[in-house]
């Protein structure tokens, strides 16, 4: 028994090391992103009349991914309603974060806490959607938030009925909408500073820009800028006076020529 326990522990440790290996993490991220992208295709072509676990039909499915696409699309729409879209987009985002690595993991780093925050945010958004009234064109028996949203709204309605507080759907919507936005924002690494920068960017984009002709006319009408006055030259000091050189000093070279004591001897004749 002890040998079997030791073997199982070693196998578990080896599996964890292999699971956390960099190439395995990247492979898992790519696989998750691809499967989530296929789920997006299935949701785009979702038809509630296709054969699935909740509907039986003898007709061929119209989903682009066939019977499997119709099955998974109906499962997500029945469970989460319109909140299935942010759930699938979060799956793609986390898959890309694991596949690309440090390029986008500064904000979107997969962790158990962020995964839990994403799940809670999606459920809260589903509840907020179920708090709304169903439009006539909605094809499902459940609300806009699916079965999960209807269940949580039902709990809120029971609590409000016990406390004799009216307006249970309004309370549920106003409570769970900010919680859902906060949970999804925390999961993707969104910060309040990012919202401020986005607001400033939209204000800059909405500011009116003068046309080019008006800018040229304003530039022509603008008075020329005055040239700066030249700086005054440095005045000579008070005790400065130019030194006048005499005429003989001007022709005198700066070196002294050797003085000859007598007439120079004639060339070609030696004096003894």
Image: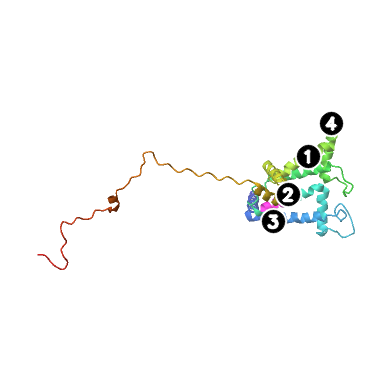
Question: Which residue appears at 76% of the width and 40% of the height?
Answer: 178
The mark closer to the camera, 2 or 3, is 2
Q: Which residue is mark 2?
A: 90
Question: Which residue appears at 80% of the width and 56% of the height?
Answer: 42
The stretch drawn in magenta includes residue 94: yes
Q: Nearer the viewer, residue 87 or 214?
A: 214
Earlier-in-chain disc, 2 versus 1: 2
Looking at the rendered structure, the secondary structure element under dot 4 is helix
Question: Which residue appears at 73% of the width and 42% of the height?
Answer: 183
Q: Are marks 4 and 1 in contact (CB under 8 Å)?
A: no
Q: In the rendering, which numbered label is found on residue 163?
A: 4
Q: Are marks 2 and 1 in contact (CB under 8 Å)?
A: no
- Crowding at mark 1 (Cα within 10 Å: few <14, some 14-19, many 20+): many
Magenta-highlighted residues: 91-98
- Crowding at mark 3 (Cα within 10 Å: few <14, some 14-19, many 20+): many
Q: In the rendering, which numbered label is found on residue 176?
A: 1
User: Mark 2 to mark 1: distance in Å?
Assistant: 19 Å
User: Mark 1 to mark 3: distance in Å?
Assistant: 32 Å
Classify residue 3 as left or right of residue 70: left
Q: Which residue is mark 3?
A: 30
């Amino acid at each position: 028994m002890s040998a079997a326990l030791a073997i199982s522990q070693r196998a578990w440790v080896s599996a964890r090391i292999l699971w956390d290996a960099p190439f395995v993490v990247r492979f898992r991220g790519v696989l998750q992103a691809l499967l989530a992208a296929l789920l997006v295709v299935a949701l785009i072509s979702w038809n509630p009349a296709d054969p699935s676990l909740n509907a039986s039909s003898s007709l061929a499915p119209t989903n682009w991914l066939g019977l499997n696409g119709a099955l998974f699309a109906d499962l997500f729409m029945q469970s989460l309603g319109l909140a299935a879209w942010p759930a699938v987009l979060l799956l793609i985002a986390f898959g890309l974060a694991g596949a690309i690595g440090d390029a986008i993991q500064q904000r979107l780093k997969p962790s158990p806490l962020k995964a839990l925050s994403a799940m809670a945010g999606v459920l809260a958004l589903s509840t907020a959607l179920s708090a709304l009234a169903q439009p006539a064109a909605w094809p499902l028996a459940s609300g806009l938030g699916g079965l999960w949203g209807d269940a949580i709204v039902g709990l809120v309605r029971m609590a409000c009925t016990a406390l004799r507080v009216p307006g249970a759907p309004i309370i549920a919507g106003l409570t769970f909408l900010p919680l859902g936005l906060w949970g999804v924002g925390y999961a993707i690494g969104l910060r309040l500073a990012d919202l401020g920068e986005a607001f400033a960017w939209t204000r800059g984009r909405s500011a009116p820009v003068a046309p080019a002709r008006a800018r040229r006319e304003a530039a022509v009408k603008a008075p020329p800028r005055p040239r700066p006055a030249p700086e005054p030259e440095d005045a000579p000091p008070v005790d400065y006076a130019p030194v006048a050189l005499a005429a003989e000093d001007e022709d005198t070279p700066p070196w002294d020529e050797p003085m000859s004591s007598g007439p120079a001897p004639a060339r070609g004749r030696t004096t003894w």
